[in-house]
Image (cartoon, rainbow, N blue to C red):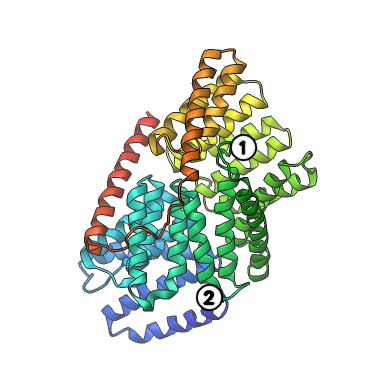
Amino acid sequence: LLDHGSLNLPGEIFRYCQKMLSWLSDEQQLRQQKLFELNYWLMKYYMSNCSFVEAIHISSFTDTLIDKLESNGDIGTLNFVQIQTQCASLWYVLGQYKKSMKFCLKALKTAHDEGAHNTAQVELLCLTAKILVFKRHFNLALRTVRFALAIVLSHPELERLLWSVLCDYGDCLLNSDHVEMAVQVYTVMAKMVHKHFGTDSLRDGQAMYEYARAAYLLLYDNYAGYRTNKEKYVQLRFRCEKYASKAVEICRAKLGKEHYQLLGAEELQALVSVKGALGSDTVQQELLNEAMETHMRALNKYCNFSNENANYARTYDCLGHIFRCLQRPEVAEEMFEKALATKKIVYGINDHETALTMASLAYLYLKDMGRPREALVLFKKCLGIQLNIFGEEYSGLGTIYDGMVLAHEVVNDLEGAQIYREKLYLWKAKRRTLEEAPSKNPFGESLYVEETFRNFALECYRALNEAQQSSDVEMTETCW
């Protein structure tokens, strides 16, 4: 019922299950296990219903109970992998990635020590992959989500999980700069959703949202000057606009007006509409005002659960771009600075996401506020971060090089401008070669997995634990 978007009947069923649980009072170990299973499903239900206060309460209760059982030596045959994974998923959805990683590490340790059944393995691997992307362990993240895909494909009874694994696979590709491959994965995912859930279902709306999000990034968030196949991108733009609009239509029909999924779809549609309008001679004031209202409403929702989360930062970024279009540079600067401050807390000072906002702020200084030297400082920081994370083939380098050429010209540093003009030329040639090469197949790599799940869980645990310790050191140094 939850998979098919039913939000009322599952609540009645769970309340009845809670009554049944009281009948098992004489079987303490069995009762404890069933309590964790029920809380796992309750968290899924509350998250689907956007009842995050209740879900957070269960997460806190469960974490405290597990700590108590472990300290008293009462674990017995209890297994906490699924409930710990669901707690991690909750905090990830809320944009509080550090809390999510804390629960992910606990789940990985439990999985290594106690093992886990196939469904729990798939859920943990998918969540771990997203946390690994957050910590910029891209190769391990893609190995992790492909491990989950291999498990699902080798167990027919897990077919219902295939669409969600593909969704997470696309997300990992999208955030590791494999945007075109992500579009391919979301295309396959949409077909799976149509097969299992039908058209105009809530899952169909989610599939359209994910496809439109990937198409938007490919169309507008990457430098397009090297592209040769213009017709391909015209078609992609049409599908992006169509699917973004359809996702909103379905979500409005199925969900409450303050639901996270609907807010996300409306924010994406606002971005797509504004970017599409920028190509025309004039951008309608009404369109920009509607987009601003959408993002402000989302911002108010996101800050209910802390103003130090990724969703909060992303929306401030969007507002910065809207105010630039409205020719209000001082307000745009304030929005970008708030996004930057939040991203430094969530991601770190030398992260890809932080660098994206630096680039946006740099362009604001350069083109709208007459502050080219400040823009150059930001561009150089941004360039260093992105090269360190992605290397010379990063799809966003063109945007940075282009800005640096213009900034050097404005300050009359023609030698500096020529240096970055040559870098831009070489980068364009490299990207054009990549574009003209045969498309990489995201399913082309072997899904055969040699290592055991427990050994792989240990590898992921060690990578994330080391990343967490490095983040703690970086945060301490920043504070000093």
Residue under label 1, please give it.
Answer: 335
In the image, residue 287 sits, relative to residue 373, either above or below, namely: below
Kind of residue at badge 2 = Lys
Q: Nearer the viewer, residue 375 or 226?
A: 226
Q: Residue at x 24, y 68 (%)?
A: 115
Residue under label 2, please give it.
Answer: 195
Kind of residue at badge 1 = Met
Q: Secondary structure at mark 1?
A: helix
The quarter of the picture where residue 389 lies is top left
The quarter of the picture where the C terminus appears is top left
Asked if residue 395 can be seen in this view, the reply is no
Q: Residues within 10 Å of mark 1 (few under 14, many from 20)?
A: many
114 left or right of 350?
Answer: left
Q: Secondary structure at mark 2?
A: helix
C-alpha gap between disc 2 and disc 1: 42 Å
Q: Residue at x 47, y 65 (%)?
A: 55
287 left or right of 221?
Answer: right
Q: Nearer the viewer, residue 425 or 346?
A: 425
Q: Position of residue 121 (x, y in %)?
A: 32, 67
- Which of the numbered marks, if any, corresponds to residue 58? none
Q: Earlier along the polypeptide chain: callout 2 or callout 1?
A: 2
Count of labels shown?
2
Q: Nearer the viewer, mark 2 or mark 1?
A: 2
The quarter of the picture where residue 69 lies is bottom left
In the image, residue 331 sits, relative to residue 210, either above or below, namely: above
Q: Position of residue 326 (x, y in %)?
A: 74, 37
28 left or right of 200?
Answer: left
In the image, residue 196 sits, relative to residue 68, either above or below, namely: below
Q: Position of residue 26 (x, y in %)?
A: 28, 85
Q: Residue at x 47, y 79 (%)?
A: 14
